[in-house]
Image: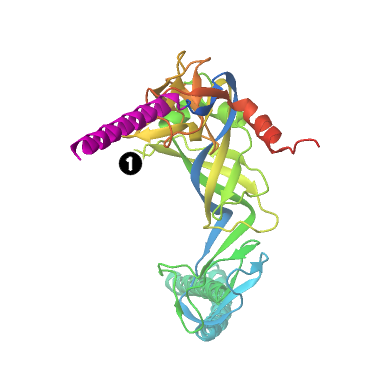
């Protein structure tokens, strides 16, 4: 029994030893993983700088009443296209019609007063002329003539006062007519009606904070966005050319809409504010877009994309990079085919698929473009596979063998 137990123990130990050696041999014989690698070479890159934008009509005219009164009729609706001169609102006309009638009545009274004063002047003049002739013939005294002349001067003064009253009455009629005309609010231009916060029965007043509505001329629209001080310096090439020359040389820009689609028509940067806002450190920029279909509405938002082209740029796929503690890295492949964690810096703007590397890589470096974040670790040895040949290899593998 003792011999049998010893034999079994020796057999088990031998089996474990063989198994362990086999496992180590299997680990040593595991092949290095094949990883797609690209060689970094200078090439041209086309990206787009992106800026949040606010859309406004070429002209956004706030419609405000010139007089106070209750709105009796709203003739349009929000979003409606209107023509210049089209009636938008009617304000209660009763009090202004009454004011016009009263002013016209005052004019009639003033006209009568003027005619009466003219008659008195004519009578006083005839009396004064007669008294002058009698004075020249020494028939009457100087005192008697002076009384007649004073009556004439008084009549002339009364006529002047009556004329002044008539002018004032006519002025009141003009004002009353204008106020009555102001009760009919019309559109100052072609455009689209904005929101209408006040409806029938609401009090309209020139002192109201809110306008009756806004008429937006949307045949062309402006997209407002901001450029930083650095952007402006880059735009003028550090002051080597004027801002006007830089604007003229800028390419057409694209507008990405709120739903992610691109507006089909291109725009052009029209103006750049020469002043930098001290609170934001940016200057306001305005791009003009044609809007024949009225698709763009004042108040909408979007993203302005300005194309940026570069030559001799080092471009790598975004999937070849990873971030760690706010820094970006890639795995470069050294001459021993080992991957090395390498920090890089990239441009802020990108096309969403690639990065333009500004430091950390040089032409000729090899970069792993697969297995980042999953397979690869610093110092791991790999079998580099040319990334450019991968599609051809995959196609060949999928192609059925000839019978």
Residue shown at 56% from the left, 24% from the top: 385
Residue shown at 50% from the left, 47% from the top: 53
Along the line of sight, which residue is nearer the eye, 107 or 212?
212
Q: Is residue 193 visible?
A: yes
In the rendered image, the residue lying farthest to the right is 403
Please tell me whether mark 1 sits on a helix, a strand or a loop. Answer: loop
The picture quadrant where one finds residue 47 is top right
Residue shown at 54% from the left, 54% from the top: 258
Which quadrant is the N terminus positioned in?
Answer: top left
The question of residue 212 being in magenta is answered with no
Which residue has dot 1 on it? 279
The picture quadrant where one finds residue 130 is bottom right
The question of residue 3 being in magenta is answered with yes
Q: Which residues are magenta?
A: 1-30
Figure colour scheme = rainbow
Please, is residue 228 above or below residue 286 in the view?
above
At which x and y percent is residue 52?
48, 46
Along the line of sight, which residue is nearer the eye, 76 or 372?
372
């Amino acid at each position: 029994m003792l011999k049998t137990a010893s034999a079994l123990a020796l057999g088990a130990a031998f089996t474990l030893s063989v198994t362990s050696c086999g496992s180590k041999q299997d680990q040593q014989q595991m092949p290095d993983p094949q990883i797609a690698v690209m060689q970094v070479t200078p090439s041209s890159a086309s990206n787009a700088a992106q800026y949040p934008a606010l859309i406004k009509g070429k002209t956004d005219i706030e419609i405000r009443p010139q007089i106070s009164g209750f709105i009796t009729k709203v003739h349009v609706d929000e979003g409606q296209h209107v023509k210049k001169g089209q009636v938008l609102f009617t304000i209660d006309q009763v009090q202004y019609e009454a004011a016009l009638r009263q002013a016209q009545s005052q004019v009639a009274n003033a006209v009568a007063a003027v005619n009466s004063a003219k008659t008195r002047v004519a009578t006083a003049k005839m009396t004064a002329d007669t008294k002058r002739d009698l004075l020249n013939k020494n028939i009457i005294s100087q005192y008697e003539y002076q009384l007649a002349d004073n009556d004439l001067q008084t009549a002339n003064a009364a006529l002047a006062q009556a004329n002044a009253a008539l002018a004032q009455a006519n002025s009141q009629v003009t004002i009353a007519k204008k106020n009555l005309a102001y009760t009919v609010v019309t559109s100052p231009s072609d455009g689209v009606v904005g929101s209408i916060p006040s409806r029938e029965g609401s009090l309209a007043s020139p002192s109201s904070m809110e306008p009756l509505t806004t008429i937006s001329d949307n045949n062309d629209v402006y997209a407002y966005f901001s450029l930083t001080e650095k952007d402006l310096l880059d735009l003028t090439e550090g002051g080597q050319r004027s801002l006007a020359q830089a604007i003229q040389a800028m390419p057409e820009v694209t507008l990405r809409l709120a739903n992610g689609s691109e507006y089909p028509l291109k725009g052009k940067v029209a103006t750049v504010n020469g002043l930098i806002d001290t609170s934001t450190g940016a200057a306001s920029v305005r791009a003009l877009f044609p809007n024949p279909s009225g698709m763009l509405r004042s108040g909408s938002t979007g993203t302005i994309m300005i194309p940026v082209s570069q030559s001799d740029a080092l471009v790598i796929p975004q999937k070849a990079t990873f971030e760690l503690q706010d820094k970006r890295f890639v795995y470069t492949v050294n001459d021993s085919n080992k991957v090395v964690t390498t920090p890089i810096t990239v441009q802020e703007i990108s096309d969403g698929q690639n990065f333009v590397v500004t430091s950390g890589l040089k032409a000729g470096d090899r970069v792993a473009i697969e297995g980042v974040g999953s397979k690869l670790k610093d110092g791991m040895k790999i079998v580099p596979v040319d990334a450019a040949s991968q599609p051809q290899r995959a196609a060949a593998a999928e192609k059925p063998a000839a019978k």
